[in-house]
Amino acid sequence: MLREIGSRFAATAACLVFVTTFGLAHLVPMGNYNFICPYSHDMVHGLVLGVGAVYCLARYARGHSANMAWATGIQLGLVQLTRAELSMPVLVACCVGVALLAREPREAWRPLLLRVLGPAVALPLVAFVLLGMLMPWGSALHGVLGSWVWVFDPAVSGMALYRESMGLADPGGNLGRILAWSVPYAMVPVPAAVLALRTRPEQRGRQATLIVAAGATALLLIIGWRHAGPADLARPLPLFVALLGVATVVALAKTPSEFAQRATLIVRLTFVVLALCLLGKILLDTRFFHYGFVLAVPGTTLMVLALLDWVPEWIAKRKGVATTFRWTALALLTGFVGIYLQLTGTCLARKNVPVGEGGNAFLADSRGRQVNAALAFLASEIPPDKTLAVVPEGLMINVLARRRNPIACINLMPPELATLGESNVLASLDKTPPDVIVVDLDRISQDGLRFRNETYARSIATWILAHYQLVARFESQPSDPMRLRLGVLRYQSGPI
């Protein structure tokens, strides 16, 4: 895809940034925000299908192949079966691309529209019919709509988790942080672009000075990465992508309709729209971890292409030294990647506690000791036929202990309870109570379950504390930064 809108050199660099910052990264204590072990596989599937749809549309723009138009529609239809935060951006981006292509001279827009939108509508309908043959039609519709069912539900969309994720908990402060972080980002590239414009090929000394200065900046970033604010480095990304979109629109408006360059600009603008729409869920609090490991990928790769291709091309057209700026940008990108490689190394170095056996074995941080102790207790004290639930989350313990969870909701986190209904989950618990519950003791009380600063599911927490007795606890030292307090609760037939 990147080769459709950039050079091989820039596309390769963007792929390296992707692999180190998103694909294999480990930027937070939990290791499920990367493409090796994603917390939700449909996030990855949605991004791959979305980028694939834009790529096929790009191939169509160059060769007007009917097969590429059909391929765009098929992937657009499949992405609608993933998640709303992926399917909507892809749909908007493809509609923008199709609309721009339909305006081009000699473009047969009706066949293009049919080939793209036909499969996009038909595939979800086919999925609905196939599911309806195996389950009630209402359940089939719910399955096809997926997360769309909850997008407009205020009980879900209004949750503190999602408001914080979008930055809406403190919109003014987050907007100020975006602007504040944009300043240091511009402090090197902008002066470098100005100097590159004012430098001529024969001025070797000035070129060398600029490149050395950028290299020194990159070295400082790598050495002092802890002070660079790695958690906030992505904040200006929506602003930069929006500016790139404006520049692309201006370039497209200035390019005559008969020029082949228009196809590249249309594809670039389509990809910009995709990148900007994907950032919508984390717009005021953009980050490369958590949801950002998927949602920030297109925007980040676009910025790499801009630094290594499009800005140098703009400089070269004005008789400046494009190579100087390109090497300067490459040095800065090296420093950027160095920060996240070291952060990944730091997180991985903390994982030195083996958990599980055989094919289920993995390394965990210090919390693995409490998990191992709980697993040993379950193996020695609880008969193997007894059922187990982990509250509020931690299904991996079921896997490692090889014990069945009897309730329908296997994860008692706020989003799951909001979608399934607290009363329904409580009814499931009361109907088929687990024989044993492993609970995070810091996240349950008579007031409810806890997530961050939020208390929820009071009825469920009260029911658990009324029907289960604490039989064992496993706690790390209070000084441990990753402190974990696990308790094993055994079911009592009557209230305790």
Image (spheres, rainbow, N blue to C red):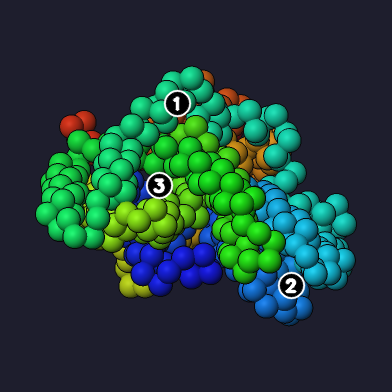
Q: Which mark is residue 399?
A: none
Which secondary structure, mark 2? Answer: helix
Is residue 464 visible in this depiction of the protein? no
Mark 3: amino acid: Phe
x, y percentage for residue 319? Answer: 35, 56
Classify mark 1: helix, strand or loop. Answer: helix
* 380 over 428 or under it: above or below: below
Name the element at disc 3.
loop
Label count reads 3
Q: Earlier in the sequence, mark 3 or mark 2?
A: 2
As rendered, which of 402 and 284 lies closer to the eye?
284
Q: Which kind of residue does numbered mark 2 sit on?
A: Ala
Q: Amino acid at mark 1?
A: Asn
Q: Which residue is mark 1?
A: 174
Q: CA distance from mark 3 to mark 2?
A: 32 Å
What residue sits 76% from the left and 52% below the top?
145
- Residue, disc 2: 69
